[in-house]
Image (spheres, grey):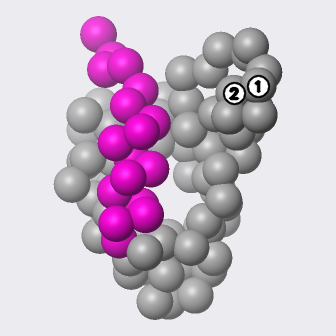
Amino acid sequence: MPNMLNAEAILRSLVASKVEFVVVGGVAMITHGSSHVTDDLDICYRRTSENIARLVGAIAPLKPYLRGAPEGLPFRFDAATIISGLNFTLTSE
């Protein structure tokens, strides 16, 4: 069974790591008073090499993996992967 989203812990990690990002989607709507319920956290992050390194440092301990990908499919969450892609839909422990 997937873990419940702990958006607050993820956001605290991003802030503590000084990642430049904005929250979008359902969590952003909730903070503005919406009653919409969401079970994911959507962010947009600044795509500089320094910021991507901070993002990886903040998120890697959660062991991110591609959501919906077959179990065992190789996936490396590192700066090179992030720089090579634009959108990632991840799950974590």
Q: Answer whether labels 1 and 2 touch (C-beta < 8 Å).
A: yes
User: What residue would you read off at disc 1?
Assistant: 33
Residue 26 drawn above or below residue 80: above
Residue located 25% across and 34% down the image = 93
Position of 81 with respect to 33 (left or right) is left
Residue type at mark 1? Gly
Q: Is residue 75 on the magenta stretch?
A: no
Identified by mark 2, the residue type is Ile
Look at mark 2 in the image and give the residue it sits on: 30
**Quick one: SS at disc 1?**
loop
Asked if residue 12 lies in the magenta stretch, the reply is yes
> Which quadrant of the figure contains the N terminus?
top left
Classify residue 84 by image quadrant: bottom right
Q: At which x and y percent is residue 21?
A: 60, 65
Q: Residue furthest front?
A: 33
Residue shown at 39% from the left, 46% from the top:
10
Residue range of the region highlighted in magenta in the rendering: 1-17
1, 37: nearer the viewer: 37
- Whether residue 81 can be seen here: no
| Residue 66 image-quadrant placement | top left
Q: Is mark 2 on a helix, strand or loop?
A: helix
Does 29 appear above or below 11? above
Determine whether, in the image, residue 33 is placed left or right of residue 20.
Answer: right
Residue plotted at (48% across, 29% down): 68
